[in-house]
Image (cartoon, helix red, strand yellow):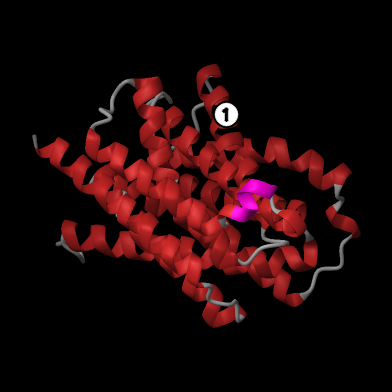
C-alpha cells in the first residue's frame, strides 16, 4: 500500500500544522489564564498531554524506558522544556497580549545557536550569524522601547516584567533544545511521553498547595481552552515535532520560526481584538529578518 502523502509533502503538512497549532495556542493560553490562573492552566494542560501521549505510546507498541539516565532526562527536560516555560508564559499572559507573547518567543533559535556553540561545540559562530544576533537584539529593543529599558518599565513595570518572563521562557526552550541532544537515544514518542509526565512532578505540588485547582470555578471557555492546549498544543504538537525531525531534520524544522510569530501576533488581533502597535510590527520584521539571515547561514554550512 502506497503512503497517502509523499515524504516532502508530508513534511510540509506537518510543519504548517505544527506552526498553526503553536501559533494559535497563545490565544488559548490567554483565554484560560484570565479565568483559572497560570498554575491550574499549566497543570491540566500537562496532565491532558501526558494522558494522550501515554495512550498513543501504548497503541504504537513502544515502551517507556525507565533506566536512571532516562528518568533524569525526563525530569530535566520536563522542567526546562515544559513546566517552567509553560508557567512563565501563562503567568505573563495574565498581563500582556497573546500576540506579544508569541513575538517575544521568536529569538529562541538564536539563543539555541549560541548555547550550542558554547556547550556542545557543534555550531560555528560566523560573521553572518553575529549579524543575525545584532539585528534580533535591536528588534527586541524596538519591541520593549528604549525608555522602558532605561526605567525598567516605569509606570508599566508589571507588563515589562511579564515580557521578561517570556524571554526567560525562550531561554528555557533554547537550553532544553541543547540538552535534548545529550539525551539517551530512545523512541521519540517514548521520550515525548516521559518528558511530559516528568514535567508534572514540578507543577503538581503548585496546583495542589500553592494555587489549589479544586478551589477554582472553571468556566466553559477555560475548560475548552485547556483541552485544546493539552491535546493539540502539547500532545499532538510533540508528535508532529519529532516526526518533522525524523523526516527532514532540524534545519527544515527551523522554518517554524518564520511562521509562529506572525500567526500568534495576528490571531491575537483577529480573535481577541488585540491592538496592532507600530513598534511590534517593526520588531516582528527585524526579528524575522534575523531568523532568515541565520537560516540561510545554517543552510549554507550544511551544504558546505
The answer to whether any part of residue 120 appears in the image is yes
Residue 303's quadrant in the figure? Answer: top left
Taking the spot 55% from the left edge, 74% from the top edge, the residue there is 268
Chief secondary structure of the magenta portion: helix
Q: Quadrant of the C terminus?
A: top left
Return the residue nearer the eye: 29 or 200. 29
Single out the residue that lies furthest toward the left: 304
Q: Looking at the image, is 159 positioned above or below residue 112?
A: below
Image point 50% across, 75% down: which residue?
A: 267
Frontmost residue, 163 versus 112: 163
Image coordinates for residue 210, horizontal then vertical, percent: 87, 44
- 148 magenta-colored: yes
Q: Which residue is mark 1?
A: 76
Q: Residue at x 15, y 37 (%)?
A: 302
Q: Mark 1: few, some, or many residues within 10 Å (few <14, many ≥20)?
A: some
Q: Which residues are magenta?
A: 147-151
Res. 85 image quadrant: top right
Residue sitting nearer the eye, 182 or 274: 274
Count of residue discs = 1
Report whether 81 appears left or right of 59: right
Amino acid at each position: 500500500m502506497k503512503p497517502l502523502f509523499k515524504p516532502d509533502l508530508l513534511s510540509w503538512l506537518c510543519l504548517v500544522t505544527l506552526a498553526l497549532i503553536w501559533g494559535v495556542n497563545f490565544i488559548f493560553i490567554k483565554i484560560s489564564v484570565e479565568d483559572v490562573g497560570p498554575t491550574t492552566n499549566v497543570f491540566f494542560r500537562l496532565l491532558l498531554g501526558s494522558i494522550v501521549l501515554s495512550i498513543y505510546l501504548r497503541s504504537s507498541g513502544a515502551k517507556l524506558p525507565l533506566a536512571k539516565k532516562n528518568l533524569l532526562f525526563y525530569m530535566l527536560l520536563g522542567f526546562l522544556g515544559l513546566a517552567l516555560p509553560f508557567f512563565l508564559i501563562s503567568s505573563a499572559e495574565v498581563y500582556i497580549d497573546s500576540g506579544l507573547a508569541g513575538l517575544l518567543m521568536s529569538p529562541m533559535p538564536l539563543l539555541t545557536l549560541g548555547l550550542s556553540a558554547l556547550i556542545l561545540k557543534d555550531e560555528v559562530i560566523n560573521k553572518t550569524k553575529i549579524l543575525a544576533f545584532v539585528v534580533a537584539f535591536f528588534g527586541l529593543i524596538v519591541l520593549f522601547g528604549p525608555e522602558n529599558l532605561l526605567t525598567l518599565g516605569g509606570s508599566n513595570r508589571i507588563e515589562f516584567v511579564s515580557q521578561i518572563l517570556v524571554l526567560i521562557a525562550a531561554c528555557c526552550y533554547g537550553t532544553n533544545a541543547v540538552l535534548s541532544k545529550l539525551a539517551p537515544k530512545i523512541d521519540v514518542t517514548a521520550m515525548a511521553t516521559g518528558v511530559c509526565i516528568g514535567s508534572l512532578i514540578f507543577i503538581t505540588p503548585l496546583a495542589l498547595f500553592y494555587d489549589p485547582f479544586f478551589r477554582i470555578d472553571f468556566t466553559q471557555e477555560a475548560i475548552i481552552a485547556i483541552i485544546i492546549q493539552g491535546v493539540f498544543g502539547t500532545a499532538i504538537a510533540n508528535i508532529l515535532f519529532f516526526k518533522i525531525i525524523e523526516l527532514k531534520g532540524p534545519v527544515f524544522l527551523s522554518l517554524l520560526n518564520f511562521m509562529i510569530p506572525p500567526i500568534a501576533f495576528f490571531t491575537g488581533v483577529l480573535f481577541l481584538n488585540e491592538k496592532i502597535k507600530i513598534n511590534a510590527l517593526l520588531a516582528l520584521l527585524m526579528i524575522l529578518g534575523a531568523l532568515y539571515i541565520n537560516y540561510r547561514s545554517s543552510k549554507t554550512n550544511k551544504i558546505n
